[in-house]
Image (spheres, grey):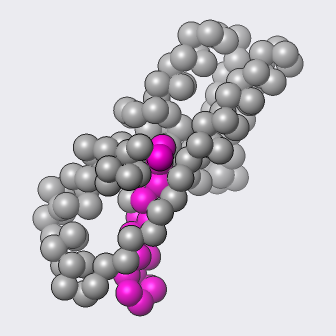
Amino acid sequence: ATLGRQFFAQKGPGKTLRDELTAAYPAVTIDRDREANTLKLRGPGAEVAVVVARIEQFRDAQLTEEVYLCKEDEVSVLNGGESSLLRIIARETGVELSMKKERDPTVVLVTGQPGPVATA
């Protein structure tokens, strides 16, 4: 799931890689199957193999950190809808942020490239 969201993001390293691969290998199509939670690649075998290797390198470079929130911090992080601190951090850094409220304390999973994850 994380690879798909990061790889198909509208900006950031996933978009950069996607644009680079599309330009270098125009005969290869990359589709996201949300239901199966996979990427589907079609094209000449040798080119598909190169694209798969690059996507796997991207996936392997992804990092996930857990940030624990106390109940008081949870309110300030979530309030504001689209202008909430959580969404601002995600937009500014290009990381994926997801909350696990069923855990105690609440956990925010920060996923992305190591530099932006550290910044977030």
Task: Name the quadrant of the N terminus.
Answer: bottom right
Numbered-mark total: 0
Q: Nearer the viewer, residue 17 or 66?
A: 66
- State whether residue 74 is above or below residue 50: below
Query: Is 117 situated left or right of 81 in this image?
Result: right
Q: Residue at x 45, y 69 (%)?
A: 66
The residue furthest right is: 45
User: Considering depth in this image, is 60 or 44 the residue closer to the camera?
Assistant: 60
For residue 11, above or below residue 76: above
Q: Which residues are magenta?
A: 98-114
Q: Quadrant of residue 43?
A: top right
Residue 32 visible from this viewpoint: no
22 over 98 or under it: above or below: above
Q: Quadrant of residue 60?
A: top right
User: Left or right: 16 with respect to 51?
Assistant: left
Where in the figure is residue 52, as x and y percent of width and height? Answer: 74, 30
Q: Residue 32 or 111: which is nearer the viewer?
A: 111
**Residue at (60%, 18%) from the top-left corner?**
21
| Residue appearing at x 25%, y 87% in the figure | 71
Does residue 15 belong to the magenta stretch?
no
Residue 24 image position (x, y, % from top left): 62, 9
Instruction: Please give left or right for residue 98 compared with residue 31 in the image.
Output: left
Can residue 43 be seen? Answer: yes
State the quadrant of the C terminus: bottom left
In percent of width and height, residue 106 lies at 37, 81
> Where is residue 65 shown, x and y percent of the image?
47, 63
